[in-house]
Image (cartoon, helix red, strand yellow):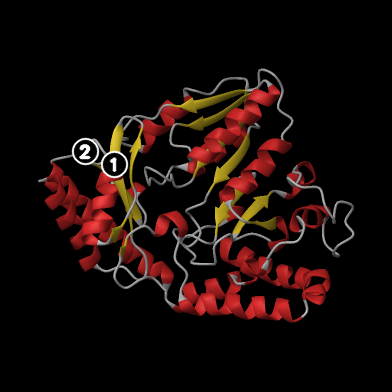
Amino acid sequence: MLDPALTYLNHGSFGACPKLIFDNLKDWQIRMEKDPVQFLESDIFPLLADSRKALGNFLGCEGDDLVYYPNPTHAVNAVARSLKLKAGDEVLSTNHIYGALDFTWQQVCQDSGAKFIKAELPLPIKSKAEFLNIFFSYMSDKTRVIFISHITSMTAMIFPVEDIIQFAKDREILTIIDGAHVPGHLPLNITELDADIYTGACHKWMCAPKGTSFLYVRKSLQDEIMPPVISWGWEGELSNTSLFLNRHEWQGTRDMTPFLVVPEAIKFLNDNNWQERSKLNRKLVISTRNQFLDLLNGEPICPDDWLGQMATIELPIDDPLQFKRSLMEIYKIQIPVFSWGNITALRYSVHFYNTEEDVKRLVAAVKELLH
């Protein structure tokens, strides 16, 4: 459904919904509006169960260990505010944390008297060993929670979360993984990953409708994680499922039809051989980064095998907003350009609909603007 006049290289921000998936959303909305009472009082709960089951199969976990949320920030807020942090406890993350969740943890720690620690991971990162040595150096005997991105938002790097989860498990530290960019981007098996809590977006790389995300919580922790709104379902009266699902699934009247589209989004990915396409996209991302590095005489901010279907390139510019505007107004290229830490950068994403010509157009446009 993208405007054909655009070169759209920003799938990582809000995704893009294919016509087939969007039509499925409209079908569910029409069904709801034919009898909203029947749909929202009775039909919705078994429909959500079917959708969760399909998503669980896709993610490698039980559907009943998942609950739908509109976005990962919403889900992490529910988790962070449920933790019984005490004064002196430490929550460890990194300086690559997503901005909204940086605010979340700062406030939660301020309210509880805990400390929010961000490991300063400099760019470039040369290896996994270097990363882990720096990250673990920020741990202490007061570290109670590790919150870390699986794929970082601004710097577009795949972090070695498997090693971090195992390290934390050996020390009985709670692990919360922000996997906003992972579903549909990388193959994911949550059970094998073995994090305590994992959240991800379906509306990004899975191409589901906007406002479709999930929260996974290990069974042994589900009674401890409270929803942000206490509503119907609090005492388990809505559906014949767990108290966890009853409490989290109903947050008052809202359009839950986007959650029902997830099975269609998964079918779309599988029908289009998404894992093979993702491998091709990754090759295109790496070759494009090499073109940029040659153009800019720069160095990569991370190894090639830390990249998926998007990458971040440092730019020698002072005004990222004006550069972004120029790319849109002159070249019709939709792409984020931003300041992060002490660098200015752009991040390009590659999905089903992108071609080699799209990224060539980007490289040529950047070259022209810089000169």
Q: Residue at x 43, y 54 (%)?
A: 13
Q: Position of residue 292 (x, y in %)?
A: 18, 49
Label 2 close to label 1 by CB (< 8 Å): yes
State the mark number for residue 317.
2
User: Which of 184 and 315 lies nearest the eye of the viewer?
Assistant: 315
Find residue 35 and report its image quarter. bottom right
Describe residue 334's horizontal placement relative to residue 28 as left or right. Answer: left
**Amino acid type, residue under disc 1 in the picture:** Pro
Is any atom of residue 197 visible in this view?
A: no
- Residue furthest out toward the top: 88
- Label 1 crowding class (10 Å Cα cut-off): few <14, some 14-19, many 20+? some
Q: Considering only vertical position in the picture, is 95 above or below 192?
A: above
Is any atom of residue 16 visible in this view?
A: yes
**Amino acid type, residue under disc 2 in the picture:** Ile
Secondary structure under the numbered disc 1 in the rendered image? helix
Residue receiving disc 1: 320
